[in-house]
Amino acid sequence: MVGHEVADALGRLLRRSTRANLYAGLTEGLGPAVDDTTYPVLSGLARTGPCSAAELAGEIGLDRSGVSRRASRLEAVGLVRREPDPGDRRAVLLTLTDAGATCVEAMRERLAARIEASLAGWPADEARIFARGLRRFVEDGPLGGEPATDAVPG
């Protein structure tokens, strides 16, 4: 049954070890603070824009303190900054710096290149059909219909 086949493939795709291996390849050489543990913070901020650690935690599946620790590492090397929330003077927002945005763009390019390389042996029409079908599944399927983004997964 196709539902079982897709479910099995998604299970392999979403495994923590699969994500960690992917993130390690995407972050290699981008600096000592950029690794498989800080990747989700950078990627999440690229998707959400400035937000609190608590909001980002919900977006990337970590707790607030985990986000704060990772953001501190990224802040120390100039990829993330903390700034006052204009809507709540007691709150602080995390935001990407220009260097952080450049880092995310490098990771996006690496991901796109890896995907292109993995599909290079496919017939072009089959690759396009796969891409359209995957986008449709993500947008309309059982995983929740959030709008597509070109942000790096994480």
Image (spheres, rainbow, N blue to C red):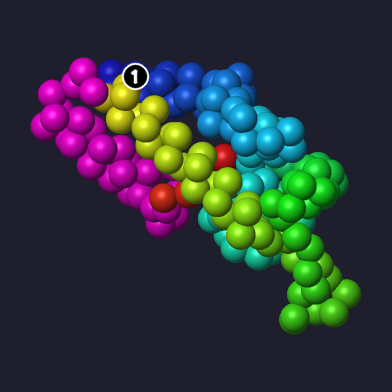
Is-magenta flag for residue 71? no
Kindly identify the residue that appears in the image at 30 percent across and 30 percent down. Answer: 116
Q: Give the structural element (helix, strand or loop) at label 1.
A: helix
75 to 111, vertically: above or below: below
Q: Which residue is mark 1?
A: 5
Task: Residue 14 in the image: state x and y as whole percent.
Answer: 52, 27
Q: Quadrant of the C terminus?
A: top right
Task: Residue 85 in the image: state x and y as whole percent.
Answer: 76, 75
Crowding at mark 1 (Cα within 10 Å: few <14, some 14-19, many 20+): few
Q: Is residue 74 visible?
A: yes
Instruction: Looking at the picture, tell me which residue is in the foreground, 71 or 4.
Output: 71
Q: Residue furthest right?
A: 90
Question: Which quadrant of the figure has residue 91?
Answer: bottom right
Q: In the image, what residue type sits under mark 1?
A: Glu
Q: Quadrant of the N terminus?
A: top left
Q: Is residue 59 visible?
A: no
The total number of labels drawn is 1
Kindly identify the residue that appears in the image at 54 percent across and 31 percent down. Answer: 26
Is-magenta flag for residue 133? yes
Question: Which quadrant of the figure has residue 121?
Answer: top left
The magenta stretch is 120-149
Q: Is residue 101 left or right of residue 68?
A: left
5 to 61, vertically: above or below: above
Kindly identify the residue that appears in the image at 19 percent across and 21 percent down. Answer: 122
Task: Residue 109 in the image: state x and y as whole percent.
Answer: 43, 40
Task: Residue 74 in the image: state x and y as whole percent.
Answer: 75, 46
118 to 40, vertically: above or below: above
Kindly identify the residue that appears in the image at 75 percent across and 81 percent down. Answer: 86
Question: Which quadrant of the figure has residue 8?
Answer: top left
